[in-house]
Image (tube, rainbow, N blue to C red):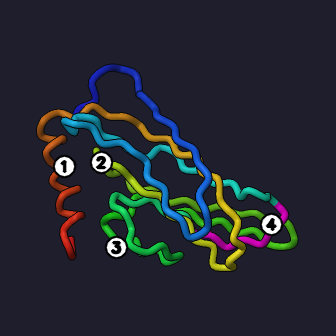
Amino acid sequence: MECYGESKMIKTFRGLIADGGQDTVVLHTNDGSTGYKVVKFQLMPTTPMDTEIQAVVKIFKIQQDTVTDDVDYSDNTLLGAAIVRQTSNLLYEQTVMFDQEVFNQDIYITYEDNIASGKAMNYYLELEQVKLDLNANTVATLKNLKNLEPGG
């Protein structure tokens, strides 16, 4: 993978995702020559310090059939996961994990609150844009195709 130029290009995305929902971050291009790496992922409940929350928000390389609060680091389609816990005594915690893998296709964000508060969650995502040479482009595209196969 080569990054052309001196400066880093950062793309930002923000959104509001419903409990049990899945958002798509559209990144694909016609030629696949633009790759991305996750730089930052932050969460904020829609009603900070007002509701009990035990939430898991995850970033995937492929669309999910079901949204759960299970986190499996051995899942090669998982790019990152964040946990938000807020209790009645106003304690707010956030933990985030990221994989530094380069991808060149759309990604998917899921949110599940196991307390079933029904409250939506705000998210903020920063991605570093990376210019892919032909070899890196081919590798990223083939990895994406492999992930789309059953059992991939």
Residue located beneath label 1 in the image = 141
On-image quarter of the C terminus: bottom left
Disc 3: CA contacts within 10 A as few (<14), some (14-19) or many (>=20) = few
> Which amino acid, by three-letter code, is at mark 4?
Leu
Residue located beneath label 2 in the image = 105
| Picture coordinates of residue 32, whole percent (x, y) | 22, 39
> Which amino acid, by three-letter code, is at mark 1?
Thr
**Distance between the alpha carbons at the discs numbered 2 and 1:** 8 Å
| Picture coordinates of residue 143, whole percent (x, y) | 20, 56
Residue located beneath label 4 in the image = 91
Name the element at disc 4: loop
Disc 2: CA contacts within 10 A as few (<14), some (14-19) or many (>=20) = many
Residue located beneath label 3 in the image = 74
| Picture coordinates of residue 151, whole percent (x, y) | 21, 76
**Distance between the alpha carbons at the discs numbered 2 and 4:** 37 Å
Give left or right: position of 35 versus 17. left
Q: Earlier in the sequence, mark 4 or mark 3?
A: 3
Q: For the residues carrying marks 4 and 1, which lies nearer the camera in this image?
A: 1
| Residue at x 48% of width, y 58% of height | 109
Q: Earlier in the sequence, mark 2 or mark 1?
A: 2
For the residues labelled 3 and 2, say whether their Cβ atoms are less than 8 Å apart.
no
Q: State which region is magenta.
A: 49-56
